[in-house]
Amino acid sequence: MGSKDNKARAALRGESHVMSELATRLLCVEPNNLVERPWGGDWIKAFKGVASEDTQALPVRWGEAFEISAFDLDNEAARFPSSLRFDDDSRVNLPTLLEAQGKALLGEAFVGRHGACFPLLPKTLDVKELLSVQGHPAGHTEVYVIIEAEPGATLRLGFNRDIDADELSSTLVRGIERQGEFLGLLGAESNATDVQLMVAPWFADRAVDVAALSHWLEKTASNRADHAAALLVELKALYWQVLDSMNEIEVRPGQVIYNATPERLVSDSGRAASAEVHALGNPAGLEILALEIRRPGPTFRAWDNVRFPQRDVDAAAAIGALNLCATRPEEFIAQRQPIPDRDGASVSVDCEYFRVEHLMPDSARAIDVPASEPHSLHCLVGAIEVSANDGRVIGSLKRGESALVPAGVCAYRVRAESPAEVVRVSLPEN
């Protein structure tokens, strides 16, 4: 390999002149760890500052960016690892570096509890269409920090009435079967992606009758058009039945939503809190850009809102993981609480899985962060400079950029020339 790999190789070998630098500076990851999703939007590339030439295939829709991805036991995280680029232009995958030099960068105590990894999976989501209706295992909650949102944008979160598991399961299985049956009625030349482009706006508009699709159905389903139309009517009723069973929460920039089973229900059930049923996004296609914070782990997709082509779903696994009792929208809105003696710093979520702080420096106010174990920083607004106690600059971030803070950084100060916001995400230390 060429000379440009020297610093990356030296880091993997643990050479002292490189490791002493890495262990005491922000590990700023490359911002172009983007993933195409069928529900993706238009904002994430500008937010991340990623130009077209920084991406390989130029997919139609970028749906999310893996911010700090260094947990290879999670299949999705392993597919999209974060990478570091050194000043000699050499690169290294973050999980590879942590596996080789975890104790030097993360500290022995941290590695002893979590392994040589970062056991959270923060992402930036750009949601333009509805995500699937989904859930996660017990102990896997989620935070959504809303960065941008079109006026009136909403998401669905938590059931708004008590749900019967068997009834929901049979309803979803029937819907999936009807969807496959409908696709089978169309001509062999029909492309599932083209079908989605045609029917998605119709499903999203509750008031439009199936007659609006009659010409298309006669062309694509021929003498089976009436049967196809009847299936679409049934599927549209189910599409809205599922959405109407969940709380609709309007979102706005700056809002923090904590997707976790309400404490009153955790106490009654005796099971660990988990993410409630959720379908991020909205039928109207009003865009949402959010920082999502969660632990690595499986996602159970129960229902995909009649999306074509059909994706894998596991309604039984999802329903088994979900709280089926009624919840209220206000139970998921997290309030930012000022942190005593730290002007400009607040905390919105402090649970047994992670802590989410918001640092808001400006030209007149720097924010001190006490020494702690490794954590991540995510710049949502403006730009910041980070310096050590001795005044040495140890890194900088601008809007859309993230960094892992090694154990050797200790205490630091965050400065900004104009109003900025940085989210700090840490794990429990005991």
Image (cartoon, grey):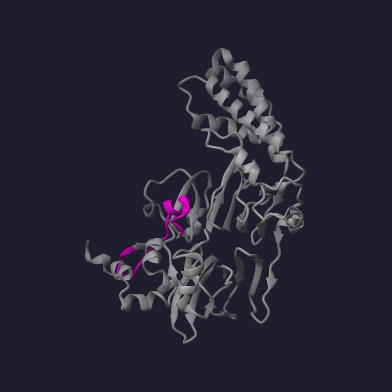
Q: Residue furthest bottom?
A: 390
Find out whether residue 79 is within the magenta segment. Answer: yes
Q: Nearer the viewer, residue 282 or 314?
A: 314
- Residue 335 coordinates in the image, percent (x, y): 71, 65
* Total marks in image: 0
Q: Residue at x 67, y 25 (%)?
A: 233
Residue 16 lies left or right of residue 134; in this view the side is left
Q: Which residue is more in the foreground, 267 or 147? A: 267
What quarter of the picture does the N terminus occupy? bottom left
Q: Which residue is rendered at x = 50% and y = 71% of the image?
A: 110
**Residue 386 at x, y percent in the picture:** 49, 77
As rendered, which of 168 and 35 lies closer to the eye? 168
Q: Residue furthest left?
A: 2
Q: Which range of residues does the magenta coloring cover?
A: 71-91
Residue 253 appears anywhere in the view: yes
Q: Is residue 257 above or below residue 221?
A: below
Above or below, 282 relative to 220:
below
In this rendering, the answer to whether 233 lies above or below 403 is above
Specify whether residue 282 is in view: no
Assess whether residue 193 is covered by the magenta stretch.
no
Q: Could you tell me residue 340's position as x and y percent?
A: 68, 79
Q: Is residue 131 above or below residue 4?
A: above
In the rendered image, which quarter contains the C terminus? bottom right
Q: Position of residue 76 (x, y in %)?
A: 47, 50
The extreme top residue here reads: 223
Does residue 62 appear to the left or right of 268 in the view shown?
left
